[in-house]
Image (spheres, helix red, strand yellow):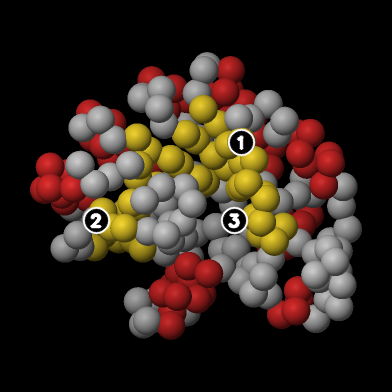
Amino acid sequence: MKHVAGYITRKSMLYVTGVEYGNYTMNHVQGCAHGCLYPCYAFMMKKRFGQVKSYEEWLRPYLVSNTLELLDKEIPRLRDKIESVHLCFTTDPFMYEYDEIAAMSMAAIRKLNAAGIRCTVLTKGVLPAGLSELSPKNEYGITLVSLDEGFRKEIEPFSAPYKERIDALRSLHELGCRTWVSVEPYPTPNIIRQDLGGILDAVSFTDRIIFGRTNYSRRVSSYRKHKEF
């Protein structure tokens, strides 16, 4: 088990988002220990606006200690506007081997579900089996862009091994949960040559698969056949 670098507080938690996963989102952690090198959009934005100074600082996650208190204040005010809440947009709710972050995520989902609010989850960590005991309207997903562990260690160095992600997702699916996979950002052939069909077969048990291209990497922009790909 790994430990967060420390704790911070915030003035608000739920906010409107334009991502396809839900109309509201929450980010109860600052930073992400997975260290993805796509490059990571969340890290670039946080660095641009001065919330983190370096990649090394980004790798040291801080947990928002007043997350549940903020939800208690905001849920009654926003409940009628919320279609669903996505965990998370700029961090990972089940960061690999960070039990404290996972516990806070579970508590937040329970609180949102108790108010009749559906949640969607996306992680590069391991989804806990306890999620199966929460609202059947929730949707639980993993990001999966390869089955090659060498590639994972290069591009997502501190995330959960692919097999662990898939096995946990499959377990939830077999327990009756709604499951999904984000195959995004999928690498162009100049980054790695691989069989997309094999990746899709590995997660063919899921209810939904979202596919998206890598679109802001220098390695992609240098690939002349990007549009054809």
Disc nearest the viewer among 2 and 3: 2
Q: In the structure shown, which secondary structural element does the residue marked by tag 1 occupy?
A: strand
Q: Viewed as shown, does residue 155 lie left or right of 8?
A: right
Q: CA distance from mark 3 to mark 1?
A: 26 Å
Disc nearest the viewer among 1 and 2: 1
Q: CA distance from mark 1 to mark 2?
A: 28 Å
Q: Quadrant of residue 207?
A: top right
Q: In the structure shown, which secondary structural element does the residue marked by tag 3 occupy?
A: loop
Number of numbered discs: 3
Does 184 appear above or below 147? below
10 Å crowding of disc 3: few (<14), some (14-19), many (20+): many
Q: Viewed as shown, does residue 10 lie left or right of 27?
A: left
Does 183 appear above or below 118? below
The disc labelled 3 sits on which kind of residue? Phe
Residue designated by label 1: 208
| Residue 7 shows up from this direction | yes
Residue drawn at x 66%, y 56% as measured from the top left: 212
Does 74 appear above or below 225? above
Q: Viewed as shown, does residue 34 lie left or right of 63?
A: right
Residue designated by label 2: 13
The disc labelled 2 sits on which kind of residue? Met
Position in image of residue 186 (x %, y %): 72, 57
Q: Quadrant of residue 75?
A: top left
Position in image of residue 164 (x %, y %): 64, 36
Residue designated by label 3: 158
Position in image of residue 62 (x %, y %): 33, 61
Pick whichever of labels 2 and 3 is earlier in the sequence. Answer: 2
The disc labelled 1 sits on which kind of residue? Arg
Residue drawn at x 76%, y 74% as measured from the top left: 220
Q: CA distance from mark 2 to mark 3?
A: 26 Å
Pick whichever of labels 3 and 1 is earlier in the sequence. Answer: 3
